Amino acid sequence: MLVKPIPDGFHSVTPFIVVNDAIEALDFYKKAFNAKEIYKFPTPDGKIMHAMMQIGDSFIMLSDEFLSMGLRSPTTVGGTSVTLHLYVSDADKIFKQSVNAGAVVTMPIMDVFWGDRYGIVMDKYGHSWAIATHKIDLTSDGLRKAAEEYFANLSKK
């Protein structure tokens, strides 16, 4: 039997995030983003060594912190330089849902120049989530013009 190099259901890039409390985080992601828990493997002391959830058509792996293995959460290292981008059919609904579940708004939801309805929240585990619904298809030239107009207006403020 031939083993597939990329398992069914996976894309070429799959985020693996580290959190302070994986069991609680899985519950948060279910409430905030309608995540489905696929599995979780606990260690003998109850921490989660490895778990997988699905949001939309994408898998996300996660685990608790294991400092001895170099697995540190954003709250331990003082922040994150990564934003997980989540496309959904109703950005306003999921944005509000995530805030109601405990996420903090870092960029209010709004229509942005690249054609999305877009906002960013920070979960209590230190991960940044951009929530978006694509609204307008722009050509490269249209995107360039929209960006130029946006930055011109921004410099006037």
Image: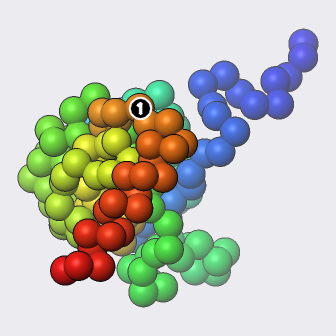
Q: How many marks?
A: 1
Nearer the observer, 23 or 108: 108
Q: Decide which of 115, 150 is in the foreground and name it.
A: 150
Q: Secondary structure at mark 1?
A: loop
The quarter of the image holding the N terminus is: top right
User: Visible in this render: residue 31?
Assistant: no
Image-quadrant location for residue 66: bottom right
Instruction: Find the residue positioned furthest to the right.
Output: 1
Tell me, yes or no, if residue 121 can be seen here: yes
**Residue 73, position as x, y percentages in the image:** 47, 74
The part of the image, by quadrant, that contains residue 70 is bottom right
Picture colour scheme: rainbow
Q: Residue furthest top?
A: 1
Residue at 27% x, 73% y is 154
Between 96 and 39, the one lying in front of the other is 96
Which residue is at a point 56% across and 55% down the rendered structure image? 16
Work out whether 79 lies above or below 118: below
Residue at 34% over, 33% down: 136
As drawn, 142 above or below 105: above
120 on left or right of 157: right
Residue 94: x %, y % from top left: 20, 41
Name the image quarter holding the C terminus.
Answer: bottom left
Q: Estimate how packed mark 1 is, as few (under 14), some (14 to 19) or many (20 or more) residues with alpha carbons within 10 Å.
A: few
Q: Position of residue 6 (x, y in %)?
A: 75, 31
Residue 148 position within the rendered picture, expressed as x and y whole percent measured from the top left: 41, 61
**In the figure, is residue 87 to the left or right of 61?**
left
**Residue at x 41%, y 32% (from the top left corner):** 137
Left or right for 108, reference 85 = left
**Residue that numbered label 1 is attached to:** 137
Q: Is residue 125 above or below residue 57?
A: below
* Residue 17 falls left or right of residue 25: right
Which amino acid, mark 1? Asp
